Image: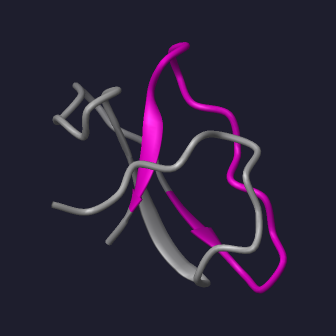
């Protein structure tokens, strides 16, 4: 199981991240973002959601 990261966190591995539920479950119409070195994870669609590296 991949770790779930909170919005606003930084210093994670650059690459693609997908929006997931609080425990890593799928959410309807998830956002997919790409971050670079030192970028912060953006806000999610709903409070409590998080990001998982793809």
**In front: 24, or 35?**
24
Residue at the spot 17% in from the left edge and 35% down from the top edge: 25
| Residue 4: image location, x then y, percent | 40, 49
| Residue 53: image location, x then y, percent | 39, 68
Residue at the spot 77% in from the left edge and 86% down from the top edge: 37
Q: Is residue 37 magenta?
A: yes
Residue at the spot 47% in from the left edge and 38% down from the top edge: 50
Residue 28, picture quadrant: top left
Residue 42, picture quadrant: top right
12 vs 18, left or right, is right
Q: In this picture, which residue range is highlighted in magenta?
A: 33-52
| Residue 35: image location, x then y, percent | 66, 72
| Residue 2: image location, x then y, percent | 26, 63
Q: Is residue 33 above or below residue 13?
A: above
3 vs 9, left or right, is left
> What main secondary structure does the magenta stretch of the protein show?
loop
């Amino acid at each position: 199981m991949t770790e779930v990261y909170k919005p606003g966190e930084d210093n994670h591995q650059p690459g693609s991240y997908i929006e997931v539920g609080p425990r890593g479950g799928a959410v309807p119409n998830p956002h997919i973002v790409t971050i670079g070195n030192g970028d912060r994870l953006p806000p999610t669609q709903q409070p409590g959601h998080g990001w998982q590296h793809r």
